[in-house]
Amino acid sequence: MGDDVNAQAAPEQLPYGPDGSHGSDDLGPEPVPVRKRTPNPRVQAFVTGAAYGGLAVAGLMLGVIESFSYSWSAGSIPLAAILWSLFNLVALWGAGRGMGGKLGAAVPALMWLAVVMVLAVQRPEGDLVVTGTAAGTIFLYGGVLAGGIALLLAPSSGEWLLGAAGRDRRG
């Protein structure tokens, strides 16, 4: 008759013991306790400063790129100015959210504004990048409005006016 398919294997061959445990009581060597590393404050400060520097460069680059491309339109609708304003809103909100505070949205917004204001001033030669057309006005006001809304929507990192004195002490 040979091997019976329904025959039970010896308890030593079962993957689980009769009580549902995983084999023997010997679980191997004791686990090594994981020591939590405290971050180096100098490294944290460097990384945070580099992140804000990157946001400043991003704001400068956005200002330059957008200033030279805001005037594209679909018929009489300044489509690029509107889309750039919406993009600024999302990008600045994301920067504030990513950095965990309003400063994360403020740094690129201020750099964007500085570049756009420089490019909106007429040079002695008569050159002007951001013009006073409908597209230029929508681009300027839309970008500033996007920066303001992004600052309002970014998470607050604490009470900026009163500091620790403004915190509720009721616990």
Image: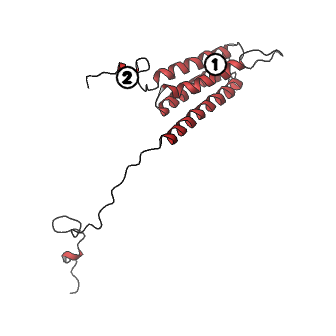
Q: CA distance from mark 1 to mark 2?
A: 39 Å
Amino acid tagged 1: Phe
- Residue 141: give x, y in percent of width and height: 60, 15
In the rendered view, tell whether residue 16 sits above or below residue 113. Answer: below
- Residue 79 visible at all: no
Residue matched to label 1: 139
Residue 59, which numbered label? none
Q: Identify the image quadrant of the N terminus.
A: bottom left
Of all residues shown, which one is farthest toward the left? 19
Q: Counting residues from the N terminus, which is met first, the one under dot 1 or under dot 2?
A: 1
Measured as percent of width and height from the top left, residue 32 is found at 33, 60
Residue 161 in picture, x, y percent from top left: 43, 17
Q: Indicate which label's residue lies in the foreground, 1 or 2.
A: 2
Residue at x-position 67% and y-position 17%: 135
Query: Between residues 50 and 156, which one lies in front from this camera angle?
Result: 50
Q: Is residue 12 visible?
A: yes
Residue at (47%, 43%) from the top-left corner?
A: 40
The residue drawn where x is 47% and y is 31% is: 97
Q: Residues within 10 Å of mark 2 (few under 14, many from 20)?
A: few
- Relative placement, left or right, of 155 versus 143 is left
Left or right of 97: which side holds 75? right
User: How are the residues colored?
Assistant: secondary structure
Q: Identify the image quadrant of residue 54.
A: top right
Secondary-structure class at tag 1: helix
Count of labels in the image: 2
* Residue sitting nearer the eye, 164 or 159: 164
The residue to which callout 2 is attached is 164
| Amino acid type of the residue that numbered disc 2 sits on in the rendered structure | Ala
For label 2, the SS is helix
Horizontally, residue 76 falls left or right of residue 16, namely right
In percent of the image, x 63 and y 24: which residue is there? 112
Q: Locate the C terminus and report the quarter of the image it occupies.
A: top left
